[in-house]
């Protein structure tokens, strides 16, 4: 009986070992296949990584870390000098840059940039017009080019260069909000606004040195009153008002005319003028002129 049990146990262990060896042998073959497949996939992934790294290098060679656009001008109606600098994200020998200016969907001008060891630089001259768009065309050493938007009407990063004509201009405006004639006096309320040029010869901001209302008979200044102008809501803008300002009505003939003028002295030496209102004498009565 004991011998039979031992024989049964030996047979059972033998069968189990055979099954284990068979199972292990099949699993080893499966692992070898999986390892081979993983190696093939790894090679493919490494190739993808290499291609992505190349694309990243190309992108770095066609991207800017920082840039500036500025302008200098002598006044309304005169051409402006545009100055451009750009620092690329990376720089390699053979990389180039150009400043492209467009207007109404057409190329206005393009200028090659020089390399000063740290930045690309370029300068060009533009006629005073509004609606310009500025782009940097950055080309990598292998010829890949990218047009980078700097400032346009849709993305006005530097509005004063997009609207170049308006930025070179300056003007004054004044509105007569109320005027009362009482015997020999005229009493007025006015609102005034001034826009100074945003682009100047030296790059310095222009301010208001003095503003005053002038009470004039024909071309003769009879009286004056200062007007305080403070910074407005927009760059280079100034605004102010004067209330209950009275001027004496002088003797005047039928052909004479009285006028109320705003005179503004700018810090760059310009004088701006605007008329608030005018009056004439009709049958001995002072009446506001029309037209």
Image (cartoon, helix red, strand yellow):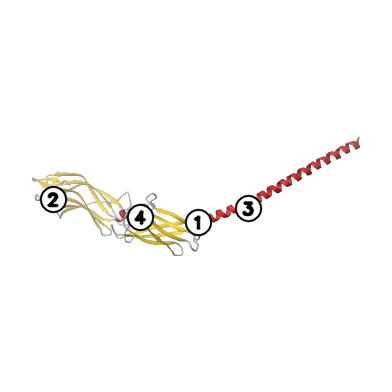
Please name the residue that numbered disc 2 is placed on.
257
Q: Percent x, y for residue 76?
A: 28, 57
Indicate which label's residue lies in the foreground, 1 or 2: 1
Q: CA distance from mark 1 to mark 4?
A: 27 Å
Q: Judge from the rendering whether residue 255 lies leftward or rightward of residue 128; answer left or right.
A: left
Locate the N terminus by quadrant.
Answer: top right
- Disc 1 crowd rating (10 Å Cα; few below 14, some 14-19, many 20+) is some
Tag 2 or tag 4, which sits nearer the N-term?
Answer: 4
Task: Look at mark 3 in the image and give the residue it sits on.
Answer: 43
Q: Position of residue 174 (x, y in %)?
A: 23, 49
Instruction: Tell me: 256 left or right of 30.
Output: left
Q: Is residue 242 above or below residue 60?
A: above
Dot 3 or dot 2, earlier in sequence: 3
Report how far apart the C-alphas of labels 4 and 2 lie in the structure: 42 Å
- Report the Cα–Cα distance between label 1 and label 2: 69 Å
- Where residue 238 appears, as percent x and y from the top left, is 29, 51
How far is the residue under mark 3 from the one under mark 1? 26 Å
Q: Nearer the viewer, residue 6 or 288?
A: 6
Which label number is shown at residue 161? Answer: 4
């Amino acid at each position: 009986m004991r011998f039979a049990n031992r024989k049964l146990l030996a047979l059972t262990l033998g069968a189990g070992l055979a099954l284990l060896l068979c199972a292990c042998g099949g699993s080893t073959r499966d692992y070898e296949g999986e390892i081979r497949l993983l190696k093939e996939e790894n090679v493919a992934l490494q190739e993808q990584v290499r291609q992505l790294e190349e694309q990243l290098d190309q992108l770095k060679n066609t991207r800017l870390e920082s840039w500036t656009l500025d302008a200098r001008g002598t006044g309304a109606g005169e051409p402006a000098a545009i100055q451009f600098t750009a620092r690329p994200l990376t720089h390699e020998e053979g990389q180039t840059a150009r400043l492209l200016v467009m207007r109404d969907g057409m190329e206005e001008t393009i200028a090659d940039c020089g390399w000063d060891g740290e930045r690309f630089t370029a300068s060009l001259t533009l006629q005073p017009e509004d609606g310009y768009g500025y782009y940097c065309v950055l080309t990598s050493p292998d010829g890949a080019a990218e047009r980078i938007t700097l400032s346009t009407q849709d993305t006005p990063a530097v509005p004063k260069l997009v609207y170049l004509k308006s930025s070179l201009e300056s003007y004054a405006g004044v509105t007569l909000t109320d005027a009362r004639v009482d015997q020999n006096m005229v009493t007025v309320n006015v609102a005034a606004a001034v826009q100074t040029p945003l682009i100047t010869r030296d790059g310095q901001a222009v301010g208001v040195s003095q503003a005053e209302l002038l009470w004039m008979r024909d071309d003769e200044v009879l009286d004056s009153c200062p007007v305080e102008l403070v910074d407005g809501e927009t760059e280079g803008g100034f605004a102010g008002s004067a209330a209950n300002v009275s001027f004496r009505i002088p003797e005047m003939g039928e052909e004479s005319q009285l006028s109320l003028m705003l005179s503004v002295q700018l810090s760059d030496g310009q004088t701006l003028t605007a008329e608030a209102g005018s009056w004439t004498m009709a049958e001995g009565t002072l009446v506001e002129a029309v037209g």
